[in-house]
Amino acid sequence: MSAIDEQEIRAIVERVKSRLDASGNSGSGLAAQTELDEISDIELGDGIFRTINEAVEAATRAFNEYQRIGLGGRYAVVDAIRASMLEQAERLAQMAHQETGLGRPEDKVIKNRLVATKAPGPEDLEPTAVTGDAGMMVTEWAPFGVIGAITPTTNPTSTIINNTIAVVSAGNACVFNVHPNAKKVSAENVRLLNRAIVSAGGPPNLITAIPTPTIASAQELMHHPDVRVLLVTGGPGVVREALKTDKRAIAAGPGNPPAVVDETADIQNAARSIVAGASFDNNLICTDEKTTIVVESVADRLLQEMGRNGAYVLKEHELRKLERIIFNELGQPNKPGAINPKWIGQDAAAILAEIGVQVDRTEIRLVVAEVPNEHSLVWTEQMMPVMPVTRVQSIDRAIDLAVKSEHRFRHTASIHSTNVERITRMAVAMNCSIFVANGSNFSGLGEGGEGFTSFSIASPSGDGLTRPRTFSRERRVTVVGALRIV
Ligand code: NAD
């Protein structure tokens, strides 16, 4: 499966823009023009309902209507979503940053564009046919119905866009219970998605949400009898809750991705890739590098190159100060600590300023701290641009520490090495949904790497990078003794 190319996307944008203008239902309507600060109450309409029950009922009606527009209609709907989200990518990124106070707006734009272009569409549902002496068998991908989706504060819009493309490509409807800290931008996102869907001939309310999501409303959604499948993206708590229900749960949980660098690596490329990857949206993405494990003989060079490529390498006394700031409680050796949420998703420059180091925000994207193997930073999903670098004697020890510090989430890991045997060995040992060699981890999401993208990587439930097939029921037709035509 290949993503649609840039030229095709531009053509779709133009087509949908003229359709939206003609219908007077432009993506930048009244609510869309309103600045976030001015949104005091989230208005109902365009997919926003007062209660979970109303949102599920409306999505159920929309699902039934959606079945009637056929596969061609589905392609048109997904094209319109891509075009509208590309047009709104920047604005939604700014709003998400403003509301959550997390990450880097310019990186959020990249995330929105990535999902709008590289999340697979209905083409993912290619049927398969087998013929033989006994006749013919065809496998097709059928929708489930209403999907209940729970989204995180770290990637609010990119997750909603990505989940929507996957779910509606497969012919389903979706009810979102978004993170309360991103409820305004998420409501705006849901509204825009609905307008795009309707502009392409899809039913209203195929995507719904409520204005004041809470943990209680998330629980209501998870247990609603008309919700067939759950899609949860977040930390360990919500994953546990979803897996406890009696529904099929597609669970995208936490990670702690280690990046191993061995003595055969192109050290400059390794340093650049890790700085770019770990600082992407201030380390908010679950796949971003969170620990660097380097073989002793190349450790000094790696640190030097990181310093030359956008990182500030802390001195020992600065690390002590930083620990007191970013941890509420430094963990025991070989255990995660309790992160101070105030610093999650903040700029490296702001974190450094707090310990008395002034740097330029655009030049320094990452703080690097050299720490021993057992230090809490190695074992914690920090979600801020502070990268621990820890030395080991050999590649064997590096892989061993990578496996242990990833806590068997089986989420994401990477290696920088030119030795194919070592790349293979680590990939096997990590057993992760995403494994990257010689690039930033965002390449594993299709940004600067091959393949489609997903912002819900469902390792706990074994679905991996979610896509339309993930939200489909596999169905078979067998015709005995006929329809083999050769
Ligand atoms: P979070 O767990 O605090 O919240 C995620 C969502 O779950 C929110 O909508 C929240 O309201 C809801 N929620 C939380 N606890 C719940 C409960 N007990 N019952 C019902 N709903 C509940 O996570 P966050 O801070 O928004 O996001 C960061 C976490 O998500 C990190 O651990 C990150 O690794 C993970 N994440 C994973 C992926 C992936 O694809 N695997 C993608 C993004 C984020």
Image (tube, rainbow, N blue to C red):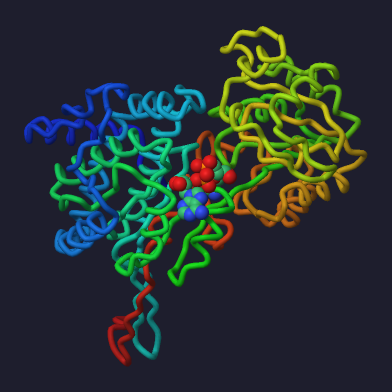
**Image quarter for residue 285?**
top right
Residue 14 visible to an observer of this rendering: yes
Q: Judge by depth and name the residue closer to the eye, 306 or 328.
A: 328
In the image: residue 28, left or right of residue 387 = left
Q: Judge by depth and name the residue closer to the eye, 471 or 284.
A: 284
In this view, 286 is above or below 457: above
Q: Position of residue 457 (x, y in %)?
A: 52, 51
Outermost residue, front side: 216
Residue 268 visible to an observer of this rendering: no
In the image: residue 56, left or right of residue 272 = left
In the image: residue 3, left or right of residue 446 = left
In this view, 254 is above or below 464: above
**Image quarter for residue 276?**
top right
- Quarter holding the C terminus is bottom left
Q: Judge by depth and name the residue closer to the eye, 328 or 265.
A: 328
Q: Position of residue 370 (x, y in %)?
A: 82, 27
Q: Position of residue 336 (x, y in %)?
A: 74, 43
Q: Position of residue 327 (x, y in %)?
A: 71, 31
Q: Residue at x 75, y 42 (%)?
A: 379
**Image quarter for residue 312?**
top right
In the image: residue 263, left or right of residue 455 = right
